[in-house]
Image (cartoon, grey):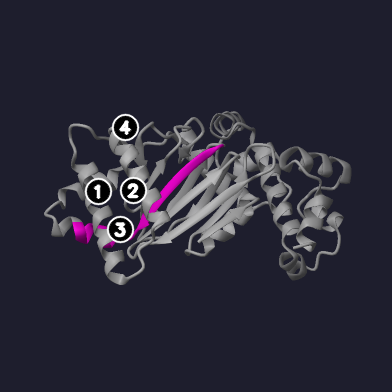
Amino acid sequence: MDLPFHSASELKQLFKLIGKSFDAVQLSQGRLQGRFRLANLGSIVLIELQTNQHLLLNGERGPDCMSFCLEATGLVEECRLFNIPLARYSLNGFRQGQIESHFQLSANTTIYLAILSTSRFNAFLSHRDSEDIIEQLETNNGLQIDPILHANFRKKFQYYLDHQPLTPQQRRQTTNHLYNSFLEAISNRTNSNFLSYAPSPRQRLVREFVSWGFRNTAQDYNLDQISESLFASRRTLIQGTKESLGMGPMEMMKRVRLEQVNWILRSPDARADQKFRTISEIAQHYGFQSRGHFAKAYQQVFAESPSETWLKSTSR
Protein backbone atom coordinates (compact mmCIF):
# COMPACT_ATOMS: atom_id res chain seq x y z
CA MET A 1 0.00 0.00 0.00
CA ASP A 2 1.34 3.41 -0.99
CA LEU A 3 -1.13 6.27 -0.60
CA PRO A 4 -0.94 10.07 -0.35
CA PHE A 5 -2.82 11.99 2.33
CA HIS A 6 -3.68 15.68 2.35
CA SER A 7 -5.18 16.13 5.80
CA ALA A 8 -4.59 14.77 9.28
CA SER A 9 -8.07 13.25 9.17
CA GLU A 10 -7.16 11.33 6.01
CA LEU A 11 -4.17 9.91 7.90
CA LYS A 12 -6.55 8.91 10.68
CA GLN A 13 -8.61 6.93 8.16
CA LEU A 14 -5.47 5.19 6.87
CA PHE A 15 -4.58 4.00 10.36
CA LYS A 16 -8.08 2.54 10.66
CA LEU A 17 -7.12 0.11 7.88
CA ILE A 18 -4.80 -1.64 10.35
CA GLY A 19 -7.21 -1.40 13.28
CA LYS A 20 -5.66 1.60 15.02
CA SER A 21 -8.04 4.24 16.36
CA PHE A 22 -6.24 7.58 16.39
CA ASP A 23 -7.48 11.14 16.34
CA ALA A 24 -5.24 13.40 14.31
CA VAL A 25 -4.73 17.14 13.98
CA GLN A 26 -2.39 19.41 12.01
CA LEU A 27 -0.43 21.64 14.41
CA SER A 28 1.47 23.77 11.89
CA GLN A 29 0.02 25.98 9.17
CA GLY A 30 0.12 25.23 5.45
CA ARG A 31 -1.06 22.81 2.79
CA LEU A 32 -0.45 19.24 3.92
CA GLN A 33 1.36 16.80 1.63
CA GLY A 34 1.88 13.37 3.14
CA ARG A 35 2.64 9.80 2.14
CA PHE A 36 1.60 6.56 3.86
CA ARG A 37 3.33 3.33 2.87
CA LEU A 38 2.51 0.00 4.48
CA ALA A 39 3.98 -3.48 4.21
CA ASN A 40 2.55 -6.60 5.86
CA LEU A 41 5.58 -8.64 6.88
CA GLY A 42 3.59 -11.38 8.59
CA SER A 43 3.86 -10.79 12.34
CA ILE A 44 5.04 -7.21 11.80
CA VAL A 45 3.32 -4.33 10.05
CA LEU A 46 5.83 -1.82 8.73
CA ILE A 47 4.74 1.77 8.01
CA GLU A 48 6.54 4.71 6.47
CA LEU A 49 5.06 8.14 7.15
CA GLN A 50 6.20 11.27 5.34
CA THR A 51 4.72 14.66 6.15
CA ASN A 52 5.57 18.28 5.39
CA GLN A 53 3.54 19.52 8.37
CA HIS A 54 3.69 19.13 12.16
CA LEU A 55 1.05 16.53 13.12
CA LEU A 56 -0.35 15.06 16.32
CA LEU A 57 -1.78 11.55 16.64
CA ASN A 58 -3.68 10.64 19.80
CA GLY A 59 -5.67 7.53 20.67
CA GLU A 60 -5.26 3.85 21.49
CA ARG A 61 -2.90 1.36 19.90
CA GLY A 62 -4.49 -1.71 21.53
CA PRO A 63 -3.70 -4.08 24.43
CA ASP A 64 -1.34 -6.50 22.64
CA CYS A 65 0.72 -3.99 20.70
CA MET A 66 4.20 -2.53 20.80
CA SER A 67 6.20 -0.67 18.19
CA PHE A 68 9.71 0.30 17.26
CA CYS A 69 9.53 3.84 15.90
CA LEU A 70 12.42 5.50 14.08
CA GLU A 71 12.75 9.11 12.87
CA ALA A 72 14.78 8.81 9.68
CA THR A 73 15.64 12.35 8.62
CA GLY A 74 17.32 13.76 11.70
CA LEU A 75 14.47 16.23 12.33
CA VAL A 76 13.53 15.28 15.86
CA GLU A 77 13.02 18.83 17.13
CA GLU A 78 9.21 18.54 17.30
CA CYS A 79 8.90 14.74 17.41
CA ARG A 80 7.51 13.75 20.80
CA LEU A 81 6.07 10.70 22.50
CA PHE A 82 3.72 11.59 25.35
CA ASN A 83 5.14 15.11 25.05
CA ILE A 84 8.68 13.88 25.71
CA PRO A 85 11.07 14.95 22.90
CA LEU A 86 12.65 12.08 20.98
CA ALA A 87 16.38 11.56 21.37
CA ARG A 88 18.53 11.53 18.27
CA TYR A 89 19.37 8.07 16.94
CA SER A 90 16.70 6.31 18.97
CA LEU A 91 14.07 3.57 18.70
CA ASN A 92 10.85 4.49 20.47
CA GLY A 93 7.36 3.38 21.44
CA PHE A 94 8.05 -0.15 22.64
CA ARG A 95 6.88 0.22 26.26
CA GLN A 96 4.84 -2.89 26.99
CA GLY A 97 1.47 -2.45 28.68
CA GLN A 98 1.06 1.01 27.13
CA ILE A 99 -2.36 1.11 25.46
CA GLU A 100 -2.57 4.83 24.76
CA SER A 101 -0.73 6.59 21.96
CA HIS A 102 0.23 10.27 21.86
CA PHE A 103 2.74 11.09 19.15
CA GLN A 104 3.87 14.29 17.43
CA LEU A 105 5.59 14.22 14.03
CA SER A 106 7.91 17.03 12.99
CA ALA A 107 7.33 18.84 9.72
CA ASN A 108 9.35 17.55 6.73
CA THR A 109 10.13 14.28 8.46
CA THR A 110 10.04 10.59 7.61
CA ILE A 111 8.97 8.17 10.33
CA TYR A 112 9.15 4.37 10.28
CA LEU A 113 6.88 2.31 12.52
CA ALA A 114 7.36 -1.41 13.04
CA ILE A 115 4.16 -2.55 14.79
CA LEU A 116 4.12 -5.98 16.39
CA SER A 117 2.38 -8.18 18.96
CA THR A 118 3.72 -7.86 22.51
CA SER A 119 2.92 -11.46 23.40
CA ARG A 120 4.52 -12.82 20.23
CA PHE A 121 7.70 -10.79 20.72
CA ASN A 122 7.90 -11.91 24.36
CA ALA A 123 7.55 -15.53 23.22
CA PHE A 124 10.48 -14.93 20.88
CA LEU A 125 12.51 -13.46 23.76
CA SER A 126 11.72 -16.53 25.89
CA HIS A 127 12.79 -18.79 23.04
CA ARG A 128 16.10 -16.88 22.93
CA ASP A 129 16.52 -17.11 26.75
CA SER A 130 16.18 -13.33 26.99
CA GLU A 131 13.17 -12.99 29.32
CA ASP A 132 15.17 -10.62 31.52
CA ILE A 133 14.81 -7.96 28.80
CA ILE A 134 11.02 -7.89 29.21
CA GLU A 135 11.30 -5.86 32.43
CA GLN A 136 13.26 -3.20 30.55
CA LEU A 137 10.55 -3.11 27.87
CA GLU A 138 7.89 -2.59 30.53
CA THR A 139 9.57 0.39 32.18
CA ASN A 140 11.22 2.19 29.25
CA ASN A 141 9.84 3.63 26.02
CA GLY A 142 12.99 4.58 24.14
CA LEU A 143 16.43 3.25 23.30
CA GLN A 144 19.27 5.47 22.07
CA ILE A 145 21.51 3.46 19.77
CA ASP A 146 24.69 3.86 17.77
CA PRO A 147 24.22 6.14 14.72
CA ILE A 148 25.47 3.40 12.40
CA LEU A 149 22.97 0.91 13.82
CA HIS A 150 20.25 3.55 13.52
CA ALA A 151 21.12 4.01 9.83
CA ASN A 152 21.07 0.22 9.33
CA PHE A 153 17.54 0.02 10.72
CA ARG A 154 16.45 2.78 8.37
CA LYS A 155 17.93 0.88 5.41
CA LYS A 156 16.25 -2.36 6.48
CA PHE A 157 12.84 -0.74 6.83
CA GLN A 158 13.25 0.98 3.47
CA TYR A 159 14.29 -2.30 1.83
CA TYR A 160 11.31 -4.27 3.12
CA LEU A 161 8.91 -1.56 2.03
CA ASP A 162 10.44 -1.63 -1.45
CA HIS A 163 10.73 -5.45 -1.58
CA GLN A 164 7.80 -6.84 0.36
CA PRO A 165 7.91 -10.60 1.06
CA LEU A 166 5.34 -12.46 -1.02
CA THR A 167 5.11 -15.95 0.48
CA PRO A 168 4.37 -17.06 4.06
CA GLN A 169 7.90 -18.47 4.33
CA GLN A 170 9.45 -15.17 3.20
CA ARG A 171 7.31 -13.26 5.70
CA ARG A 172 8.38 -15.57 8.54
CA GLN A 173 12.03 -15.12 7.59
CA THR A 174 11.63 -11.34 7.47
CA THR A 175 9.87 -11.26 10.84
CA ASN A 176 12.54 -13.42 12.47
CA HIS A 177 15.29 -11.25 10.99
CA LEU A 178 13.74 -8.08 12.41
CA TYR A 179 13.04 -9.73 15.77
CA ASN A 180 16.72 -10.65 15.99
CA SER A 181 17.75 -7.13 14.95
CA PHE A 182 15.60 -5.60 17.71
CA LEU A 183 16.99 -8.07 20.25
CA GLU A 184 20.58 -7.27 19.27
CA ALA A 185 19.93 -3.54 19.68
CA ILE A 186 18.24 -4.00 23.04
CA SER A 187 20.99 -6.34 24.31
CA ASN A 188 23.89 -4.10 23.27
CA ARG A 189 24.98 -2.71 26.63
CA THR A 190 27.92 -0.85 25.12
CA ASN A 191 26.25 1.24 22.41
CA SER A 192 22.58 1.28 23.52
CA ASN A 193 21.03 3.30 26.32
CA PHE A 194 17.46 2.84 27.57
CA LEU A 195 15.40 6.01 27.93
CA SER A 196 12.95 5.83 30.81
CA TYR A 197 9.25 6.56 30.43
CA ALA A 198 8.85 9.46 32.84
CA PRO A 199 6.50 12.21 31.60
CA SER A 200 6.16 15.06 34.05
CA PRO A 201 2.76 15.89 35.62
CA ARG A 202 2.46 18.78 33.15
CA GLN A 203 3.21 16.51 30.19
CA ARG A 204 0.61 14.02 31.42
CA LEU A 205 -1.89 16.85 31.75
CA VAL A 206 -1.39 17.85 28.11
CA ARG A 207 -2.14 14.32 26.92
CA GLU A 208 -5.27 14.22 29.09
CA PHE A 209 -6.31 17.61 27.72
CA VAL A 210 -5.90 16.50 24.10
CA SER A 211 -7.98 13.36 24.72
CA TRP A 212 -10.61 15.45 26.51
CA GLY A 213 -10.58 17.98 23.69
CA PHE A 214 -11.34 15.42 20.98
CA ARG A 215 -14.22 14.06 23.07
CA ASN A 216 -15.77 17.46 23.75
CA THR A 217 -15.42 19.52 20.57
CA ALA A 218 -19.20 19.83 20.19
CA GLN A 219 -19.46 21.64 23.55
CA ASP A 220 -18.72 25.33 24.10
CA TYR A 221 -16.34 25.26 27.07
CA ASN A 222 -14.28 28.19 28.32
CA LEU A 223 -10.80 27.90 29.80
CA ASP A 224 -12.01 27.86 33.41
CA GLN A 225 -14.42 25.01 32.66
CA ILE A 226 -11.73 23.01 30.84
CA SER A 227 -9.28 23.50 33.73
CA GLU A 228 -11.92 22.45 36.24
CA SER A 229 -12.75 19.33 34.22
CA LEU A 230 -9.08 18.33 34.23
CA PHE A 231 -8.53 19.27 37.90
CA ALA A 232 -5.77 21.66 36.86
CA SER A 233 -5.06 25.36 37.18
CA ARG A 234 -5.41 27.68 34.20
CA ARG A 235 -1.74 28.59 34.49
CA THR A 236 -0.50 24.99 34.45
CA LEU A 237 -2.70 24.06 31.50
CA ILE A 238 -1.62 27.09 29.47
CA GLN A 239 2.07 26.54 30.21
CA GLY A 240 1.82 22.84 29.41
CA THR A 241 0.07 23.22 26.06
CA LYS A 242 2.35 26.03 24.92
CA GLU A 243 5.41 23.99 25.89
CA SER A 244 4.24 20.75 24.25
CA LEU A 245 1.98 21.92 21.39
CA GLY A 246 3.20 25.42 20.63
CA MET A 247 -0.20 26.98 21.33
CA GLY A 248 -2.58 27.67 24.20
CA PRO A 249 -5.47 25.36 25.12
CA MET A 250 -8.21 27.44 23.48
CA GLU A 251 -6.24 27.69 20.23
CA MET A 252 -5.74 23.92 20.36
CA MET A 253 -9.48 23.39 20.81
CA LYS A 254 -10.13 25.60 17.78
CA ARG A 255 -7.53 23.67 15.78
CA VAL A 256 -9.28 20.37 16.59
CA ARG A 257 -12.65 21.79 15.50
CA LEU A 258 -11.11 23.12 12.27
CA GLU A 259 -9.68 19.67 11.62
CA GLN A 260 -13.14 18.15 11.96
CA VAL A 261 -14.59 20.73 9.58
CA ASN A 262 -11.77 19.98 7.13
CA TRP A 263 -12.65 16.28 7.16
CA ILE A 264 -16.35 16.92 6.55
CA LEU A 265 -15.53 19.24 3.66
CA ARG A 266 -13.23 16.59 2.17
CA SER A 267 -15.71 13.74 2.51
CA PRO A 268 -19.02 13.70 0.57
CA ASP A 269 -19.99 10.53 2.46
CA ALA A 270 -19.44 12.22 5.84
CA ARG A 271 -21.55 15.19 4.72
CA ALA A 272 -24.33 12.89 3.55
CA ASP A 273 -24.29 10.91 6.81
CA GLN A 274 -24.76 14.08 8.86
CA LYS A 275 -27.08 15.71 6.29
CA PHE A 276 -24.96 18.83 5.86
CA ARG A 277 -25.91 20.88 2.81
CA THR A 278 -23.81 24.04 3.20
CA ILE A 279 -20.44 25.13 4.54
CA SER A 280 -22.19 27.43 7.01
CA GLU A 281 -24.07 24.49 8.51
CA ILE A 282 -20.85 22.58 9.01
CA ALA A 283 -19.03 25.55 10.55
CA GLN A 284 -21.88 26.30 12.95
CA HIS A 285 -22.16 22.66 13.97
CA TYR A 286 -18.53 22.79 15.14
CA GLY A 287 -18.95 26.05 17.03
CA PHE A 288 -17.94 28.67 14.45
CA GLN A 289 -20.70 31.27 14.53
CA SER A 290 -18.95 34.02 12.55
CA ARG A 291 -18.55 33.00 8.92
CA GLY A 292 -15.81 35.58 8.33
CA HIS A 293 -13.73 34.58 11.34
CA PHE A 294 -14.18 30.89 10.47
CA ALA A 295 -13.08 31.33 6.85
CA LYS A 296 -10.02 33.35 7.90
CA ALA A 297 -8.96 30.79 10.52
CA TYR A 298 -9.49 27.91 8.08
CA GLN A 299 -7.43 29.64 5.37
CA GLN A 300 -4.58 30.31 7.81
CA VAL A 301 -4.28 26.67 8.84
CA PHE A 302 -4.94 24.79 5.59
CA ALA A 303 -3.78 27.37 3.00
CA GLU A 304 -7.06 27.17 1.08
CA SER A 305 -10.61 28.39 1.58
CA PRO A 306 -13.41 26.12 2.83
CA SER A 307 -15.11 26.37 -0.55
CA GLU A 308 -11.91 25.21 -2.31
CA THR A 309 -11.79 22.11 -0.10
CA TRP A 310 -15.48 21.42 -0.80
CA LEU A 311 -15.03 21.77 -4.57
CA LYS A 312 -12.06 19.40 -4.58
CA SER A 313 -14.18 16.72 -2.89
CA THR A 314 -16.92 16.99 -5.54
CA SER A 315 -14.50 16.76 -8.47
CA ARG A 316 -12.88 13.46 -7.47
State how far apart marks 4 and 3 are (Cα): 26 Å
Q: Quadrant of residue 175?
A: bottom left
State how far apart marks 4 and 1 are (Cα): 15 Å
Callout 4 environment at 10 Å: few (<14), some (14 to 19), or many (20+)? few
Residue at 78% across, 44% down: 304
- For mark 3, what is the residue? 118
Q: Is residue 246 above or below residue 58?
A: above
Residue 215 showing in the rendered view: no
Q: Is residue 304 left or right of residue 122?
A: right
- For mark 4, what is the residue? 147
Q: Which residues are magenta?
A: 108-124
- Residue type for callout 1: Ser
- Residue type for callout 4: Pro
- For mark 1, what is the residue? 181
Residue at 44% across, 32% down: 74
- Report helix, strand or loop for mark 4: helix
Do residues under tags 1 and 2 come within 8 Å of each other at their CB atoms?
Answer: yes
State how far apart marks 3 and 1 are (Cα): 16 Å
- For mark 2, what is the residue? 156
**Is residue 141 rendered magenta in the image?**
no
Q: Nearer the viewer, mark 3 or mark 2?
A: 2
Q: Position of residue 151 (x, y in %)?
A: 34, 38
Callout 1 environment at 10 Å: few (<14), some (14 to 19), or many (20+)? some
